[in-house]
Amino acid sequence: MVKAKRGLIFLTCLTSALSAIVCLLSFGTQNWIEAKGTYGSLDGYNIITYGLFTGSFKRNVGSVSIHEIVMTCLISDNVCAMLCKSTSEDRKWELQKLYNNDKVTFDTDCPQVFRSNYRPIPATRILREDVGGERTFISAASFIFTAFFLIVSAVFGLAAAVLAVWNTAGNPIYTVFSIYGMQIYNIVGAVTVLLTIIVWGAEYNITIISNACILETIIGDMSTIESNLGYSYWILFVPLVLYPTSAGILYLRQYLINKEPEKQVDIQEDGDIIMY
């Protein structure tokens, strides 16, 4: 392969690497959903913020306490929710009761991140059951595909960045490691990050926009009065732009190479070689 336009190849290393970093940043941060809820006449707004795996629930009842919430799923039932029981087993047990429309007692053992003169709601209080219909949950399939597509996008972005360094310094002989391979990796990164945006965006509009899907909102004790997609979601539009940009830069490189005049070789009778 022609060693030409190395600067453009290295530029794709930067754009692909930045895309992968943003995907990983989105994957690990806790601002995919930012919501507010209210118990009605009890005190002020309660703040719910979470990412794909963990988050926080700022409960404002009497005074403020902040609790860690964790994504909990029952794959066989295709349901997930953000719950705050102390152990994974307890969270799954609670989710199963929620899914079965069983009564659930008030959650008093949420791990407290911070407390300020916390006045708990009495533990004997039984939160009301849904009246008619089924309780609302996050789709386990949506959660799994969101996480999967995002990881795939990051992996292909990192692979494209590594290959850009390799192709800047040398000429890999296999197509999968060549400039063409880099183009494919960037395209895959763009497609998978787009699928991430679509899948989670659809789940938000179908479910989370009206129900933050923590215990209190699932059973109807708390109303979700506001729910928004946070910055962890919106930053995915950065790699959605940068991945095609990387592929475009590689296409531009090849276009510029193709436009360069070919060197012609003229062998004179005396054996001299003239290139022009």
Image: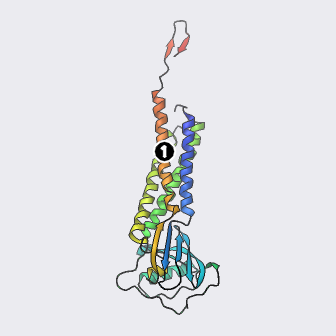
Residue at 56% x, 77% y: name it: 58
Taking the view exactly as shown, the residue that stands out farthest to the top is: 270
Place of residue 197 in the rendered image (x, y in percent of width and height, measured from the top left) = 44, 59
Residue at the outermost left position = 133
Give the camera-side residue of 95 and 166. Answer: 95
Whether residue 187 is visible here, answered yes or no, is yes
Viewer-proximal residue among 254 and 58: 58
Q: Is residue 95 left or right of residue 21?
A: left
Structure colour scheme: rainbow
Q: Residue furthest bottom?
A: 124
Image location of residue 83, percent across then percent down: 52, 77
Identity of the residue drawn at 46% across and 66% down? 144
How many numbered callouts? 1
Q: Amino acid at mark 1?
A: Thr
Residue 63 rendering spot, x and y as whole percentages: 60, 83
Which residue was labeled with disc 1? 245
Which residue is nearer to you in this view: 215 or 264?
A: 215
In the image, residue 183 sits, relative to residue 139, either above or below, namely above
Q: Could you say whether the residue bearing mark 1 is in a helix, strand or loop? A: helix
Lateral position of residue 12 relative to residue 259, left or right: right
Q: Quadrant of residue 123?
A: bottom right
Residue 8 location, quadrant = top right
- Residue 13 in the image: above or below residue 200: above
Tell me the quarter of the picture where residue 272 sits.
Answer: top right
Q: Position of residue 266 (x, y in %)?
A: 50, 13
Q: Quick one: label 1, few (<14), some, or many (20+) residues within 10 Å?
A: some
Question: Looking at the image, can residue 158 be seen?
Answer: no
